[in-house]
Image (cartoon, rainbow, N blue to C red):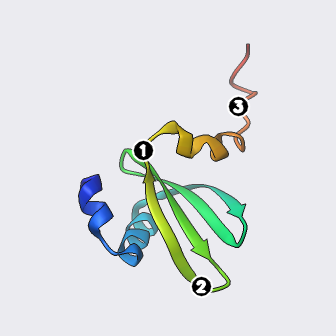
């Protein structure tokens, strides 16, 4: 499935695809949202969930490195990276 086709699907269907076929990588919290990062296909995706209302509010494919920045700060690569 290409990105355009994915984006045309309703929010709940996009979330279902990511949750079923994606590989969970990380979680972060912002205000009242739980934001989870997944790897699916050849892309990274975020699923924004609002627990207070028990609903998904955003599902998006991250198309550049800027979207991954909050997660990169969570990963410690000091064991494999030496200056």
In front of the other: 82 or 67? 67
Q: Residues within 10 Å of mark 1 (few under 14, many from 20)?
A: few
Q: Is residue 43 left or right of residue 30?
A: left
32 sits left or right of 38 in the view: right
In what quadrant of the picture does the N terminus appear?
bottom left
- Could you tell me which secondary element the residue under label 2 belongs to? loop
| Horizontal and vertical percent position of residue 71 | 64, 46
Q: Which residue is mark 1?
A: 63
Compared to residue 28, the image places residue 42 above or below, namely: above
Q: Residue at x 40, y 74 (%)?
A: 11
Q: Distance between the Cα atoms at labels 3 and 2?
A: 34 Å
- In the depicted view, which residue is nearer to us: 25 or 57? 57
Quadrant of residue 22 within the rendered picture: bottom left
Q: Earlier in the sequence, mark 3 or mark 1?
A: 1
Identify the element where label 1 is drawn: loop
Single out the residue that lies furthest toward the bottom.
53
**Helix or strand or loop: what does disc 3 sit on?**
loop
Mark 3 or mark 2: which is in front?
2
Give the distance between the C-alpha atoms of the residues marked 2 and 1, in whole angstroms. 27 Å
Picture disc at residue 54: 2
Note whether 49 is above or below 1 in the view shown. Answer: below
* Separation of residues labelled 3 and 1 (CA atoms): 23 Å
Residue 77 tag number: 3
């Amino acid at each position: 499935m290409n990105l355009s086709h994915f984006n045309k699907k309703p929010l709940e269907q996009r979330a279902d695809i990511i949750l079923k076929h994606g590989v969970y990588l990380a979680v972060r919290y912002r205000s009242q949202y739980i934001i989870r990062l997944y790897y699916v296909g050849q892309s990274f995706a975020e699923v924004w969930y609002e627990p207070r209302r028990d609903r998904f509010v955003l599902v998006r494919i991250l198309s550049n490195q800027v979207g991954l920045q909050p997660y990169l700060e969570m990963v410690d690569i000091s064991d494999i990276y030496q200056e």
